[in-house]
Amino acid sequence: MLFAAVLLFGCKQKVPRPDDALGTARLFIESSLKGDYELARELMHADSVNTYELNQLERKYKEDMTEKDKAGYRKASIIIHEVQQVSDTIVIINYSNSFKNKKMPIKVIRPKDQWEVDLHYTFTGNL
């Protein structure tokens, strides 16, 4: 029985990382809506501001949000309103979700060889 439990946890499939900005943004938003902040962290540009902001979002989700709201977010669809290609390495995506329907921007950057979400723009509006 213990072996089966270890085998199940060890076989948890890793979600393939998207190779484009829109796919990265969608997966990040979806993981946040579902409360999967471990996956969201993997997709985020790792710096102190992003880590702080994501930790705040996770805390609010886990500690402040009602179960009804969590269920609403988990069932929500992502609505893409606009994709703005700022440069070869910066894309701004304006989106909302079907649960709250509030337009939000998210910035996706490619500092090296993969796209990463950068929350700086979402909270400050600064590129």
Image (tube, rainbow, N blue to C red):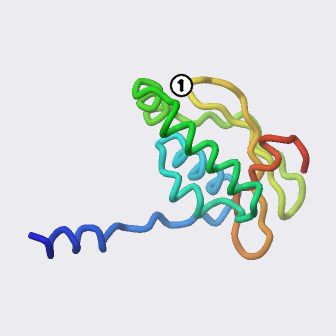
Compared with 101, 48 (above or below) is below
Compared with 98, 42 (above or below) is below
Residue 94 is left or right of residue 27, and the answer is right
In front here: 90 or 31? 31
Q: Residue at x 67, y 61 (%)?
A: 20
Question: In the image, what residue type sits under mark 1?
Answer: Phe
Q: Residue at x 51, y 58 (%)?
A: 38
Compared with 33, 68 (above or below) is above
Task: Tell me which corner region of the image, top left, top right, bottom left or bottom right, holds residue 13.
Answer: bottom left
Q: Position of residue 85 (x, y in %)?
A: 84, 52
Q: Position of residue 120 (x, y in %)?
A: 80, 49
In front here: 49 or 18? 49
Say which element carries label 1.
loop
Q: Position of residue 73 (x, y in %)?
A: 49, 32
The residue wearing badge 1 is 99
Task: Tell me which corner region of the image, top left, top right, bottom left or bottom right, holds residue 46.
Answer: bottom right
Instruction: Check the image and name the residue furthest to the left.
Output: 1
Task: Tell me which corner region of the image, top left, top right, bottom left or bottom right, holds residue 93.
Answer: top right
Q: Mark 1 packing: few (<14 Cα in 10 Å), some, or many (20+)?
A: some
Compared with 37, 97 (above or below) is above
Q: Residue at x 53, y 45 (%)?
A: 30
**Which quarter of the rendered picture does the N terminus lie within?**
bottom left
Q: Position of residue 122 (x, y in %)?
A: 77, 42
Residue 1 is left or right of residue 28, and the answer is left
Q: Residue at x 74, y 45 (%)?
A: 106
